[in-house]
Image: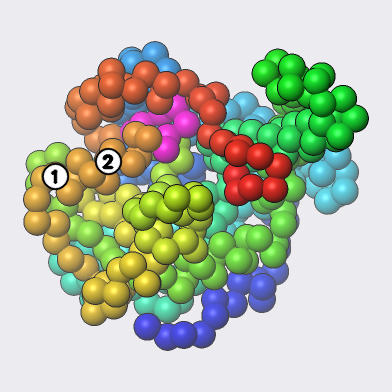
Amino acid sequence: MESSQVPVSSIGIRWVVMETRAKKQHYVPRLYLESFARGERVSVFDKATGKVFWSSLRDVACQRYFYDLPDLDRAAGVAQALEKFFHPFEEAAAAVLKRLRASLHGGDFVAITRDQRIDLSIFLALQMLRTPESREHSVQLRLALHREAFLAWLQDREPELAATARESFALEMTEDEKIRTQVRTLLDHEQRDRIAEILYQHYWVVLENPFSSPFITSDHPACNHGTLSHPVRSMQGLASTGAEILFPLSPRSLLLIVERRAFPHAARIDGRLTTLGSPENVVYYNHWQVRHAYRFLYSTDSDFALAQSMLEETPELGDPRNARIGVRSMGDEL
């Protein structure tokens, strides 16, 4: 693998001018979900209700005016600025995904090229930051930081009151404030570039699924988790030792991005294709889609038995507002 850095900072942001206002704004692009659909319809599992149903691609992974922020539009001089901001990155990723899927389906896939890795690194960095799941995480993190800062201030002045307040004091945000919180992250080019660089420098492996059970995807498809534990640190960061990033490409293929120190054996297959050896591998990767989905899972069929069993064991997985942030004390790792 080449050691050169991903040149994300060289990409100019192009505001795409469109005359119509988009009501349904997709946080997972249709160009991606097409591979998990039958025609124009995809099978959906709702973690909040347990219901399974079929839906049109235009009606999934979207919310009405999800990215609309008038202040940003005025500053950018264009309506629905954030919605349009994603277009060039989606177009670049669409071309890469189309070529990858065609070569995988045709059996002539050789390896992910450097240019493909660059385009996908940028796309995945944004995809991780643009979903309802990432918004909820950002909101909870910001509220937790403000809460702990206030309690630390109160502890210095009224220790007895602080002890009581810790149990009852809570903060809330308006919907506009939640959008603003996510927008700050999305438009922080240094953070986006840093995430893209981390992804680019990891090992990339394309996993082929030869079994009858398909890979599923979700409303937060590019998900990461830590494979190692630590007595103090969370080990859940993208750059943490043992990090795995999972991105299903289709029901039959998945992009696995792994941190180098914990997975040195992946060096020999970096950028290449390997076939899963057991159906349990499919269960393992689908399991993480269920855990990280904000609310909805998507598949080519209606078999969501894994998700249903996981919700029976852990009902809080079905709550979109379930706590994602744990705070030990002010100054400790979140």
User: How many marks overall?
Assistant: 2
Image point (82%, 26%), residue name: 159
Q: Amino acid at mark 1?
A: Glu
Query: For the residue carrying disc 1, how many other residues have a C-alpha within 10 Å: few (<14), some (14-19), or many (20+)?
Result: few
Q: Residue 115 has which mark?
A: none
Q: Residue 286 has which mark?
A: 2
Does residue 116 appear anywhere in the picture?
yes
Magenta stretch in the rendered image? 292-298
Q: Nearer the viewer, residue 106 or 332?
A: 332
> Which quarter shows the N terminus?
bottom left
**Secondary element at tag 1:** helix
Q: Can you say whether 267 is above or below 190 in the image?
A: below
Which image quadrant for residue 142?
top right
Q: Nearer the viewer, residue 149 or 220?
A: 149
Image point (67%, 51%), residue name: 186
Magenta-drawn stretch contains 275: no
Does residue 20 appear anywhere in the picture?
no
Image point (31%, 64%), residue name: 100
Which image quadrant for residue 311?
top left
Residue furthest to the right in view is 157
**Secondary element at tag 2:** helix
- Residue 296 coordinates in the image, percent (x, y): 41, 28
Q: Amino acid at mark 2?
A: Asn
Which of disc 2 and disc 1 is earlier in sequence?
A: 1
> Which quarter shows the C terminus?
top right
Which residue does the numbered mark 1 point to in the structure image? 280
In whole angstroms, how far apart are the C-alphas of marks 1 and 2? 10 Å
User: For this view, does 36 lie left or right of residue 175?
Assistant: left
